Structure formats: structure tokens, C-alpha cells
Image: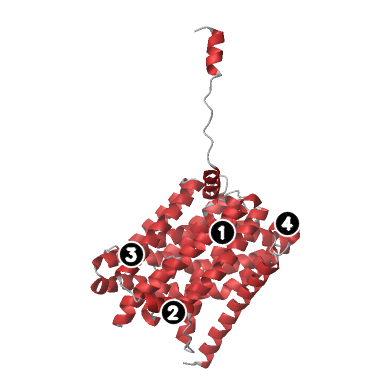
Amino acid sequence: MTEPRRRARARVVPPLPRLPAWRVRLLAVLAVLGPGLVSGFADNDAGGITTYSLVGSTFGYALLWVILASQIVLFFTQEVGARLGLATGKGLMGLIRERWGVRWAAFAALLMLVANLGSTVAEFAGIGSALGIFGVPPQVSALVAAVVVVGFITLGSYSRVQYFFVGVGALVSLAYVVSAVQAQPDWGLAARSLVLPSLSSSPAYWLAVVGTVGTTITPWGQAFIQSYVADKGLRPDDLAASRVDVFSGALLTNLIAGFIVVACAATLYVAGVTITSAADAAQALEPIAGQAATVIFAGGLLGASFLGLGVVPMTSAYTTCEAFGWETGVDWNWREAPAFYGLLAFFIGFAALFVMIPGLPLINVMFLAQVLNALLLPFILVFVMLLAGDRALMGPLASGRVLRTIGWISTGLLVLLSLVLAAVSVLGVG
């Protein structure tokens, strides 16, 4: 073939197919999805499942209204966190350090780490409880879980970590939907309990309310979504798709929480069965709803624990590095971000050793960790709301009057909830 003919033939390039507009928009949304879904799925971790199981088996359908109320607050708080990440490209602790200095950043980071420690221990307890049903010793399960999670995060790319977390979350969600349907609940009573609160003056009732809120709206979740949005490199133009991501995550979080409560209310509460952990709930379901429900519930607990074990310690590493200005992010390798990965391994290893303490009341640790989340959350939200309303920092993504009002009301309600819990506990009413 002569050179002119070769050049002429090379110029004949078939035109690329033009995608329909709806497919272009869909692909744009899919590219942004991740932070909200991962945060939402991870909210239903071992501590969350344990809390929802206890709530369902102790109070039946009565606390479903708390899940609906926290759904609304969760969406707005997560949306604000995402917008902070979109507008600044920085994590929450980094912004606090720049705005108020290292001391306030260290204070906020300490609050976060205290809350996260209990949650991380709860993840190991959940893995031990789930595998314990099948005869695996807790020491073995803790060691294997720590090695698997650290190895997966440090050796995988950002996209692999994200898709793994979303995939596990989807499987866990499906497990609890199936468990709830197999329990054959009273859907009418569940629907009424969702919108008509049945209040009580019992300290145990309000402790359960605070625990339910604390496992749904968490300090680590607030920081995680902002750091993850920044880590993914999203920008202000991604706001619309990011809202879809956040709304989907918040909706799925509370939907699955509701299914867990319904499953336990329809079986354990009706039968008068007392449980002390989510693993007990899984085993107690067998004579009532069949062996399949037990295996599905236990499998969901295991998957949720692994998901939380990947996300919560990662948030602790993000928090510490941002507070002191160190390199952070899952797209860096060990050599580029040694502090981030070193802290990640430390938090996981410390919690793994802690959970091996003989005689440690794991059920109390798992539940009270959620209560601690609710008590510390208002402090974190104050920082978030002050930053979100700063137009010099946020530009066009700064919170308007409506969002600021909702945010401050939510923060005030969380403080009020803490005061109510303290009052009924001190007075011993009920």
C-alpha cells in the first residue's frame, strides 16, 4: 500500500456514538455516588444492628417514629457535610484548624476519637458475635478481621474501596429486608407507630431513644462524608448529584433500620424473648421464623460489622491527620501518607486488642457507644453549622436561611434530648 493511500485510510475514523442526554446525566450521577451511600450503609453497623434489635425486642414497634424523625435530620446534616467538602475540597478537622486554630481542632478531633473508639470496638464485637454462632473463637475472628480490613484498604485503590463498601452495604440491606418479611409482622401497626409517637417517662425508653438517634446520626458520619467527598475530588458542580447520593444513603439507612426493628418486634417482642446482643437476636429468630432467618440475620451482622470496621477507623485516621495537617486519603500509598495508614492500623489494632479483654460486657459497650455518639454529636454540629454559614468560605454553597434554621433546630433538639435523658435518669421517673 502506498504512503498516500495509507494516510487516507488512516483518516477514515468512524464517528463516536452520541449518547442520549438522559444517559449522560445518569453517568454523571453515578460518577459522584459513593460518599453518601457508604456513610449511610455504615450507619447500620454492628452497634446499630444491636441497638435496633434491642429496641425491637424490648419496645416492639413503639420507637419506629424515632427512625423516621432521625431520617429527616440525617439528610440535612449529611447534605451540609457534603457541601462543605464540595465547596472547600477539605475535611472537617482541616477547616476547624484553619478557622479556629490547632487547639479547637484537637478538641473536636478528641471528641470524634472518643466516640469512634466505642464504635470500632462494637464492630469487632459484632464480627465475633456473628462468627461465634458458627463456633469461631472471638480472638481468632478479631485477628482475621483486623488483617483483612487493613490489608484491603491499604492495598486497594479508591474505587475498589468505595465499590466494596457499597456492595457490602447492599447485601446487608437485602438480608434484613428478607428477615423482616419472613417474620410476618403487623405492617398496619408498624405504619401507625412510624407517624404516631408513643411516649413514655421511663428512663429505659429515653435511653433507647438516644441510642437509636446516636446510631443513625453519628459524629463520625458527619466528618466521614465531608472527608470522602474531598478525597474523591468532587467539586461544586457536583452538588445536584451529591444530593442524590446523600438522600439515597439517608433513606436506605433508616429503611433498613426500620426493617430490623420490625423483624425483632414481630418475633422476639411478641414471644417475650429477652436478648443481650444482635447475635442473640439471630439465634432467637430460628424457632420463630426459621433457620433461614437466623442465617440471614447473622450474615447481615457480619457484613455490617466489616463495613463499619472499614469506615469508622478510616474516619479516625482522616480526623487526626486533618487536625494536624498531615497527608490523608485512600488514594495515597503507605510511603506518601504514612501517618494516615499508621493511624488507621493503630485504631483497628487497639480496638481488636480491647475487645479481647476477658469479661468485657460487649453488649453494654456496643449500646452505650451509640448513646455516646448522640451526646457528642451536638458539639460537632456546632462547628459544622458555623462553617456552613460562612459565605467567604463556602461561596454560593453557603447554607441559606432555611438550611441554617433546620440545622440549628436539629442541634438544639439533640441537646434537648440529652437533657431529657439526664432528667429522667436522675429523677428516676417511670
Of the two numbered discs 4 and 2 on the same chain, state the one appearing first in sequence. 2
Kindly identify which numbered label has been placed on residue 420.
Answer: none
Residue at image position (35%, 72%) is 263
Judging from the image, what secondary structure is the residue with disc 3 in? Answer: helix
Q: Say which residue label 2 marks.
A: 193
Judging from the image, what secondary structure is the residue with disc 2 in? Answer: helix
CA distance separating discs 4 and 2: 42 Å
Residue 115 at x, y percent in the picture: 53, 69
Of the two numbered discs 1 and 2 on the same chain, state the one appearing first in sequence. 2
Badge 1 amino acid: Ile
Badge 2 amino acid: Ser
Pair 3/2: label in front: 2
Of the two numbered discs 3 and 4 on the same chain, state the one appearing first in sequence. 3
Q: Does the CB distance between marks 1 and 4 fall below 8 Å? A: no
Q: Say which residue label 3 marks.
A: 178
Residue 145 at x, y percent in the picture: 39, 57
